[in-house]
Amino acid sequence: MRIQPDRATFRELSAQYSVVPVWTEVLADVETPVSAYLKLVGDQPGFLLESVEHGERWSRYSFVGRNAQRTLVLRDGVVSADGPLPDGTVLDRGILAAMESLLEIYRAPFLSELPPLQGGLMGFLGFDVVREVEQLPEGGADDRGLPDAVMSMIGSLVAFDHWRQRAYVLE
């Protein structure tokens, strides 16, 4: 198994970025994203992203993620985290500012040899998050008690390249 990048490239990238993906590429001709999700994530928190183009044809990539490093939750206008965050993380200005500050702290290179999703934040932003950027009248009462946003920093990621029948395992 070949681990990438090599040591010299890793050192060079880590001098410029706070996060450097480490990965290996494996044959994925008998594994599917759904079976990988069931094996790797099971009943733990994680995600599976699959896409279809024009409602009929599978897209090039699918992604399975697990082991979130941190999760941010927006509820009733208050952002909280499930553990300690690095200095400089902004929580008192909304979920969008919190996300922006985390992405500035955890800067990573975009590596052209990898699929387009290589790390970052994954989750959902509810409709009411628009109130962080637009002045709107009060919305209706919250009758469900669900968070307005949940965003997790991707920990482990498997990216399936359906065209090449390969999978990239990234940490």
Image (cartoon, rainbow, N blue to C red):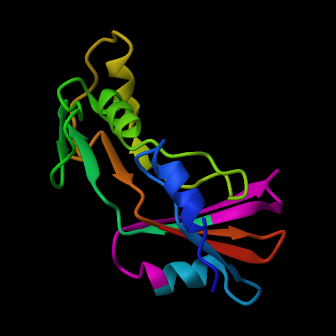
Residue 56 position (above or below residue 34): above
Magenta-tinted stretch: 40-62
Residue drawn at the location 78% of the way across and 70% of the way down? 162
Q: What x and y, as percent, mark residue 79? A: 20, 37
Q: Nearer the viewer, residue 105 or 146?
A: 105
Q: What x and y, as percent, mark residue 99? A: 36, 36
Q: Tell me where residue 167 sits by quadrant.
A: bottom right
41 sits left or right of 48 in the view:
left
Residue drawn at the location 56% of the way across and 82% of the way down? 36
In the displayed image of the protein, which residue is found farthest to the bottom? 30
12 sits left or right of 138 in the view:
right
Residue 75 position (above or below residue 4): above
Residue 43: say if magenta: yes
Secondary structure mainly formed by the magenta segment: strand
Residue drawn at the location 60% of the way across and 53% of the way down? 117
Q: What x and y, as percent, mark residue 85? A: 20, 46
Q: Quadrant of the N terminus?
A: bottom right
Residue 160: say if magenta: no
155 sits left or right of 94 in the view:
right
150 sits left or right of 86 in the view:
right
Q: Tell me where residue 107 sits by quadrant.
A: top left
